[in-house]
Image (cartoon, grey):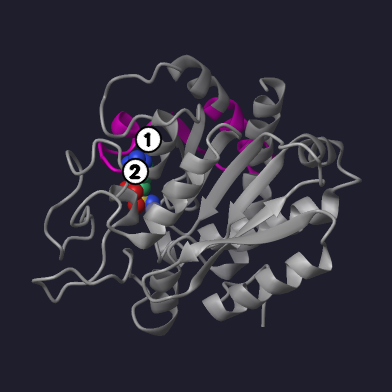
Amino acid sequence: SHSYTNYNSWDEVQSWIAAISTSNSALISKQSIGSTYEGRPMTLLKLGKKSNVTKPAIFMDCGIHAREWISPAFCQWFVKEALSTYGSDSQMTSLLDQMDVYVLPVFNIDGYDYTHKSNRFWRKTRSRTSGTICRGTDPNRNFNASWCTTGSSRHPCSEVFCGSKVESEVEVRNVADFLRRNKADIKAYLTIHSYSQLVLFPYSYTYDLAADHSELLKVAEGASSALRSLYGTGYTSGPGAPTIYPAAGGSDDYAYDIGVKYSFTFELRDTGRYGFLLPASQIKPTCMETMLAIKYIAAHVQENL
Ligand code: 0X9
Ligand code: ZN
């Protein structure tokens, strides 16, 4: 059964999505943005006080990479915290009064399910490519951001296969379509990965600095120090290319290039002791400290609406 302090299977996450959105209808609603390659529904949660006018929004996704289990755990934690602290926490109340927060709890559902049932270390989607027995495309190499030019591979068996073409993956198309349709309202794009303890921002496809580099660096550093204030967990911040490695086709660079200025990739705990196998005992502390970073960014976005 579903638990915020354990890693949940896709079936558990799916029932949780249904249950949480019916039990809190004043603050949360759900919408489908399409289906995955294997036909699972991609349900997007929308958190925020209802309004007659369109509100500015933050978009956050988790689980682009299947094996990074702490990431979907964080999205679930965030939704719980948002609902349970609205009305008592002044910042959360102000955030959900002024803005909507879209949460996609698991982006790569087929891959996530596969890590629970067959291969714990699967990273990519589960789509077939003609001419090879190797399955899956790296969804974070499949976006239309200098696609397949660096840090990606044209070989379908590679862990960083960029796909047969831009947006070959239906999951990527579904999210990119949503971002394009709503880009006038989406002020921030947050994407949660693991591991390495980093707050990254554009660009990863080039070493060129983003037009908003100094502001993004300031916000990333503020988010890192807010996170560190709880348990002393050390995070590094910087543009993707020099901070982790150059890699094109990522969702953060795509969101930024269509005009979403506050675009950040989080790499959560740890720095490699457990890596993707982060013990469930670390879910709660990881989520609690990460909440502070996300709320720091949200506050900055609100101040700059
Ligand atoms: O390589 C990635 O996609 C991310 N690291 S991970 O270990 N979670 O796979 C980093 C993504 C940084 N952003 C871009 N490359 N656009
Ligand atoms: Zn990842």
Is the CB of mark 2 within 8 Å of ligand 1? yes
Q: Which residue is mark 2?
A: 250
**Residue in the foreground of this view, choosing between 256 and 225:** 256
**Residue in the foreground of this view, choosing between 180 and 291:** 180
Q: CA distance from mark 2 to mark 1?
A: 6 Å
**Residue 228 included in the magenta stretch of the image:** yes
Percent position (x, y) of residue 137?
A: 26, 61
**CA neighbours of label 2 inside 10 A, class few (<14), some (14 to 19), many (20+):** many
Residue that appears at 37% across and 35% down:
253
Q: Which residue is mark 1?
A: 253
Percent position (x, y) of residue 107?
A: 47, 60
Q: Is residue 272 visible?
A: no
Q: Is residue 162 above or below residue 278?
A: above
Q: Amino acid at mark 1?
A: Asp
Is the CB of mark 1 within 8 Å of ligand 1? yes
Quarter holding the N terminus is bottom right
State the residue lying farthest toward the right: 88
